Structure formats: structure tokens, C-alpha cells
């Protein structure tokens, strides 16, 4: 019995000693930032302090919210058009207030939704070749919120179903095909900080300024469960961990330490596991990949991205590694799985908006494997760009998991749908034209465009012209007092030699 007890003690001690060493195929995942020529440069990224990503990407386009003088705008760039952005690139400029969130339709790569400070949600159609002029005509405008709309989310399996959360404490479920609200969820007592849908879209998790985490049935608005989340006063974020029945949240402790926690969706009275990250001040955004069970945590203003593996055994989450960078991030977008480079074992791709310069930098998360063959253990079937349900089926109560597709490339499969950058023959222009372009490029980098109607700024322009004329006359009078009148050339003096008028 004594030997058996000693063996059990040694086993327990060994488990404690090797607690941090786990066998995982994702243990050595590393981040590889793109080269400068493969980045998107000269982008006037928004300086809005709202806790959103301001970036959305799909296999065709990259969309980024930009800084403008009046109203709100975002640019749409074909994914393959990397390099320096033209200073007069076309934008989507239909909102009258700052844009707070943008999301691509998961089932149509040409449709994007945007929400704004002007209390509206708008849907836009982007042609395959991109924008050639400013886009001001929207497809659908959704009006229902009484205050600014902070976040939007597409339903993961049902077509034409969109969710929006506003500062009026409401979550509205929209049928965009009809342009009307399906349901208005009014159960929050304060501002909503985040929302996330589970794998089949039958439940929605929200975090709120009242520090509560809620799980809601979106068609009826019934609260399935709720509980106190992180104790700190700053914003908390939540994400459903696929089909596991668990939720991950990020937030702050009572002493302002950053935390993450794992919850059971059926019992939110206390977390299954909670851990401290660090004591930085930036809000932490979670990104979950259901195919690899990896969750990425990226703080706003941080330069690093931490990633963890989700398991079914306690403590349900295990630290893997982190991507380090000296450049802080303002926001992050991520590419859908169907457009990743499987030949290079790429399992995730971020699009990082730099906080200190107008740069969007792709970052590939790669599993180090020598073989160039397709690795089925890294790439299980993933969500396809086809809806499993119609809007009416979902409204009537039907639930369905996402339709899946294989990422394995063969002669009958074409996955990577990307726009091809057209090459134009460069024409030599006169030096005067080139100088004007350089001048306008400099002015565009030093000034902010104003999209207000011309009739609103005509009066200001007239005052500026009058002021300039007055200053010129004052200078001419001062000059005339210091020089003899006979030595001052008259403006209407005629040249006797050439007969021309000055």
C-alpha cells in the first residue's frame, strides 16, 4: 500500500510538473507578416475611438473605415491590389455620420453592411472590378434604432438575416430582403459592448455595460441565462466557442487587470475558468477558429497577438504562443478560411491596421510543416459560402449547421476567388502635369477631404476670396507710402514698345 501511495504521489507531482507542456500540433504556430510591397499603404485610417475593428475582408475585397471631415466613409480595395493607395481612391460615402462597424455578407462577396452614428444600417453592392467613382447609392437602408448603431453581425447559416446592436440598448434582428425588423430584443439595461452567435445561429451572447453576460434566443428575445461577467468598468467582449456549448469572454478585473474567462452557456452564475492576461489598458478582442479550435486574443493598442487552444477538458483553454510586433494595432480583420494558402500551411490570416501610420499589414499564422501536400488534420471541412437556410425558414424556427466544403484543391475545385489587378500601359505625361499631380498628392496627405455639398461651403469660399483681396490691397498701400509715386509701376500702364497691357 505504501508503494502504491508513493506511485500515486509521483504521478500527481509529474502531472503538476508537466502541466504547461502539452502535445499539440499547433504548439509551434507562428505569425509571418507580409512584406511591405504586399501591404496596403497610404490609407487614411479612421481615428474614431469606438471599440470596433474598422476592417473587414473576404476573398475579393478589403474594406477599411477612413477618416473624413464630414459624414462617414470607407474604402474598398481588391485584395490583390497591394501597394500604395492612390490619394484620390474612390470611397463609399453614403452615411451622414461616422461609420462604426462594417461586415461582409458571408454568402455574397459583393455585399457589405455598414452601421453608423447616424442611427442607420446600409447595405452596399461592390462590383467585381471595384469602385471607379465614389459610391453614394445604397441597396437597402435599415432604420429602427433611436441612437447610434455600434455593432452588426450576419447570421452564420441563414440568408439575409442581420443583427444590429445600438446605444439605445436594443438588439434588432433584420430581414434585409424585405427591409424590415423580424424582432426587437429589449432586455439590456445599458449600452451593449459586444454580441456573438453560436455555430447554428440559434443563440446570441451579449456583454453589456451593466457587467452582465447574457445568452438570448434571438427569435423570441427570451433570456436563456445571464450572470455577472468581469468586474471591471471597461468593455467586455464575448465569442461563442463553436459547437462546444461554451463562451469565451475578455474584460477587466476590479483592479483593471485584463482577463479572459470560459463559461458554460447554460450556467452563467460563475465561470468554468478565469485567468489574468496582464495589466495593460487596451480592450482585448477574441477571434475564434472553429476548425482548429484556436482562439486569438488581440488588444487594441497592443503589438502582440496571443493564441490559445480550446479543449474539452478542464481548464478548457491552453496557451500556445504569441506573435510579437513593435507596431500597435488599431483594428484587425480576418480572412475567411476558404481563401487561405493551404500549400503553406496557413491556418489563419489577420489584416492589421497600424495605429501610427496608414498601413494595413496581412499577418499569416502558419503551422511549420515541411511537406507541400494537403494536410487533412490542419484543414477539416470548413463553412462554405452558401446558406443552409432561407430567411423565412429561420424565422419559422428551423435551425441548421453551416454547409461545409473541402479546402483540398483538385482539378474540379476552384476555391480562391480573387480579383485580378489589371495592368495598364504607362503613358509618359508632360512635366507640368506630373508636377500638378505631385502637388495634389502632397496636399491630400496634409488635408482632409470634405464631402459636404457645395452650397454649404460657398459662403466660406467667398469670404476667403474677399479676405485675400483686402490683404493684397493693404500691402499695395503700405508699399506705395515707402516709394515715390513716380517709381511705382501702374497696373494699367501700357508698354510703348510692345503695345501690351500690364
Image (cartoon, grey):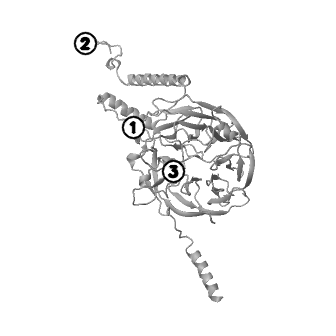
Within 10 Å of the Cα at label 3, are there few (<14), some (14-19), or many (20+) other Cα atoms? many
Quadrant position of residue 459: top right
In this view of the protein, can residue 354 be seen by the observer? no
Q: Position of residue 84 (x, y in %)?
A: 40, 41
Along the viewing direction, whichever of 460 and 344 lies nearer the viewer: 344
Q: Residue at x 55, y 63 (%)?
A: 319
Q: Earlier in the sequence, mark 2 or mark 1?
A: 1
Judged from this view, the residue extending furthest toward the left is 497
Label 3 – label 2 distance at C-alpha: 66 Å
Q: Residue at x 48, y 32 (%)?
A: 127
Along the viewing direction, whichever of 234 and 484 lies nearer the viewer: 234
Q: Earlier in the sequence, mark 3 or mark 1?
A: 3
In this view of the protein, can residue 313 be seen by the observer? yes
Q: Position of residue 51 (x, y in %)?
A: 60, 47
Residue under label 1, please give it.
421
Under circle 1, the secondary element is loop
Under circle 2, the secondary element is loop
Of circles 3 and 1, the one toward us is: 1
Residue 498: which disc?
2
Q: Position of residue 346 (x, y in %)?
A: 46, 54
Quick one: quadrant of the N terminus?
bottom right
Residue under label 3, please give it.
329
Along the viewing direction, whichever of 110 and 69 lies nearer the viewer: 110
Q: Is residue 491 above or below residue 8?
A: above
Amino acid at each position: 500500500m505504501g508503494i502504491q501511495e508513493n506511485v500515486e504521489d509521483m504521478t500527481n507531482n509529474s502531472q503538476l510538473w508537466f502541466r504547461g507542456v502539452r502535445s499539440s500540433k499547433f504548439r509551434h504556430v507562428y505569425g509571418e507578416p507580409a512584406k511591405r510591397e504586399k501591404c496596403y499603404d497610404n490609407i487614411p485610417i479612421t481615428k474614431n475611438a469606438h471599440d470596433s475593428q474598422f476592417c473587414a475582408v473576404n476573398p475579393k475585397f478589403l474594406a477599411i473605415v477612413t477618416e473624413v471631415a464630414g459624414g462617414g466613409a470607407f474604402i474598398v480595395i481588391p485584395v490583390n491590389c497591394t501597394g500604395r493607395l492612390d490619394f484620390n481612391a474612390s470611397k463609399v460615402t453614403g452615411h451622414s455620420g461616422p461609420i462604426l462597424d462594417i461586415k461582409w455578407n458571408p454568402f455574397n462577396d459583393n455585399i457589405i453592411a455598414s452601421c453608423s452614428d447616424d442611427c442607420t444600417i446600409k447595405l452596399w453592392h461592390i462590383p467585381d472590378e471595384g469602385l471607379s467613382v465614389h459610391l453614394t447609392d445604397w441597396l437597402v437602408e435599415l432604420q429602427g434604432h433611436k441612437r447610434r448603431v455600434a455593432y452588426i453581425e450576419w447570421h452564420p447559416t441563414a440568408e439575409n438575416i442581420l443583427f444590429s446592436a445600438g446605444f439605445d440598448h436594443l438588439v434588432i434582428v433584420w430581414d434585409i430582403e424585405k427591409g424590415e425588423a423580424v424582432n426587437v430584443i429589449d432586455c439590456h439595461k445599458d449600452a451593449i459592448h459586444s454580441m456573438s452567435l453560436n455555430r447554428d445561429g440559434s443563440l446570441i451572447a451579449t456583454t453589456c455595460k451593466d457587467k452582465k453576460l447574457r445568452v438570448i434566443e434571438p427569435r423570441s428575445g427570451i433570456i436563456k441565462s445571464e450572470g455577472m461577467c468581469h468586474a471591471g468598468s471597461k468593455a467586455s467582449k464575448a465569442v461563442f466557442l463553436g459547437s462546444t456549448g461554451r463562451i469565451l469572454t475578455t474584460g477587466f478585473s476590479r483592479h483593471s487587470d485584463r482577463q479572459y474567462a470560459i463559461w458554460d452557456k447554460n450556467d452563467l452564475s460563475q465561470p468554468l475558468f478565469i485567468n489574468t492576461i496582464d495589466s495593460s489598458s487596451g480592450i482585448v478582442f477574441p477571434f475564434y477558429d472553429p476548425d482548429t479550435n484556436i482562439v486569438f486574443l488581440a488588444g487594441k493598442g497592443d503589438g502582440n497577438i496571443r493564441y490559445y487552444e480550446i479543449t474539452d477538458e478542464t481548464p478548457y483553454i491552453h496557451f500556445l504562443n504569441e506573435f510579437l510586433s513593435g507596431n500597435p494595432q488599431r483594428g484587425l480583420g480576418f480572412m475567411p478560411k476558404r481563401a487561405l494558402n493551404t500549400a503553406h500551411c496557413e491556418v489563419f490570416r489577420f489584416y492589421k491596421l497600424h495605429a501610427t501610420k496608414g498601413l494595413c499589414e496581412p499577418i499569416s499564422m502558419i503551422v511549420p510543416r515541411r511537406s507541400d501536400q494537403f494536410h487533412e488534420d490542419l484543414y477539416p471541412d470548413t463553412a462554405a459560402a452558401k446558406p443552409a437556410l432561407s430567411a423565412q425558414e429561420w424565422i419559422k424556427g428551423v435551425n441548421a449547421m453551416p454547409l461545409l466544403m473541402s479546402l483540398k484543391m483538385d482539378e474540379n475545385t476552384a476555391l480562391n476567388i480573387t480579383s485580378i489587378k489589371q495592368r495598364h500601359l504607362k503613358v509618359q505625361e508632360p512635366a507640368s502635369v506630373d508636377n500638378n499631380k505631385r502637388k495634389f498628392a502632397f496636399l491630400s496627405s496634409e488635408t482632409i477631404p470634405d464631402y459636404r455639398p457645395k452650397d454649404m461651403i460657398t459662403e466660406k469660399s467667398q469670404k476667403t476670396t474677399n479676405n485675400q483681396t483686402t490683404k493684397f490691397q493693404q500691402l499695395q498701400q503700405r508699399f506705395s507710402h515707402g516709394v515715390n509715386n513716380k517709381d511705382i509701376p501702374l497696373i494699367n500702364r501700357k508698354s510703348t514698345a510692345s503695345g501690351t497691357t500690364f
